[in-house]
Image (spheres, rainbow, N blue to C red):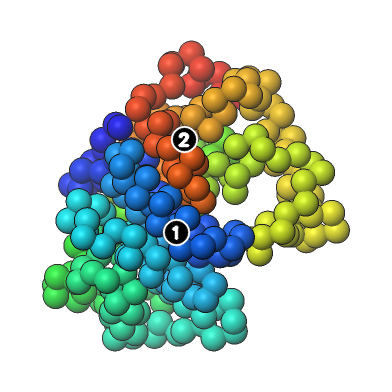
Amino acid sequence: MLKRKLGKTGLDVSAVGMGTWNIGNQWGDLDEKQVYDTIQTAYSQGITVFDTADAYGIPGGCSEERLGQALKGMRENVVFISKFGNWAKRFGGAMQFTCADIVIEACHASLFRLQTNYLDVALCHLNDLKPEETEPWLDGLDELKRRGLIRHYGISTDDLNVLKEFNRRGSCEVVELDYSLINKTPETNGMLDYCLNNNIGVLVRGPLAQGILSGHYTRETHFTDTIRTPFNEGGSAREVYLQKMDRLDRIIAAAGRENLIETSLRYILNHPCQPVVIPGAKSPKQAIANAAAGSALLEDELYAKLKAC
């Protein structure tokens, strides 16, 4: 497994981590044994970064709880990253982060569910955070850092202006963003350049584009999980899905279908800003496949070919 320095945090981490959105039943029901086996397999394959959020799971917090239980006793060997800001939003009970105390209490709740007394990285989970909403977050995260409850902090956003505003004190150390062969927007909208120039660590969510880059789905696939049902015929995101599948066809024409997961993850790893990819996994087999991608980078010729497609 390749190692990375996560920006100015100085944390030594595996180039491939694990995202845990889909271990909390939103992507289909999973029993706890399968979840624990998947997480522990990821760890055994050299994955040391585990990303989660308070809002992940049915019920809310399920992903954090399962992650904490699965890695109990291994805490000092892994990096825990969690996000807060969207607790109960799906159920009409979104919290208003109007002061630092609310940020601090949200972090305490995540620590409880993860069965740990600190987070390696805490992230604001509000993609469209407004400038006037930023100060309470920075004050709260600075205080959490002062108390030793978090070591580093940042934000999950795809908006360069939000990132710049969140970094107004120069204290943003990590950004989590959506980036894949399907969605190469961060290459052209300034996000990756800004991170590189400011030594901000980059965590990449969605590196397999909600599973599309696994090559397992077709235009006729009918999704039953709670996340991708809008892709189905008649769904609100049907046209978006079809556009993604058109994009997939071009990627396969350029790189072939064999080793598609490996190729997709390595494409992200090749970027000069040294991203860490955090694909999800719902089985030990998927965890092994994801981890294997972290053993090498793409050859220059294939990387250039994919950048151009």
Q: What secondary structure is found at the residue carrying circle 2?
A: helix
Question: What is the spatial separation of the Cα atoms under label 2 and label 1, in whole angstroms?
Answer: 19 Å
**At 25% across and 43% down in the image, what residue appears?**
13
* Mark linked to residue 299: none
- Indicate which label's residue lies in the foreground, 2 or 1: 1
Q: In the image, what residue type sits under mark 2?
A: Ala
Q: Give residue 40's position: percent from left, percent from top.
A: 35, 50
Comparing 34 with 103, the one in front is: 34
| Left or right of 96, for residue 58 | right
| Left or right of 230, for residue 300 | left
Q: In the image, what residue type sits under mark 1?
A: Lys
Q: Give residue 101's position: percent from left, percent from top.
A: 29, 86
Q: Give residue 147's position: percent from left, percent from top.
A: 14, 75
**At 67% across and 38% down in the image, what residue appears?**
216
Q: Counting residues from the N terminus, which is met first, the one under dot 2 or under dot 1? A: 1
Q: Which residue is most to the top?
A: 301
Q: Give residue 137's position: percent from left, percent from top.
A: 33, 74
Q: Which residue is most to the front?
A: 33
| Left or right of 199, for residue 83 | right
| Disc 2 target residue | 289
* Mark linked to residue 33: 1
Q: Dividing the picture into quarters, in which one does residue 290 lie?
A: top left
**At 76% across and 39% down in the image, what residue appears?**
218
Q: Quadrant of the N terminus?
A: top left
Q: Quadrant of the C terminus?
A: top right
Q: Dividing the picture into quarters, in which one does residue 242 lie?
A: top right
Query: Badge 1 local density, few (<14 within 10 Å), some, or many (20+)?
Result: few
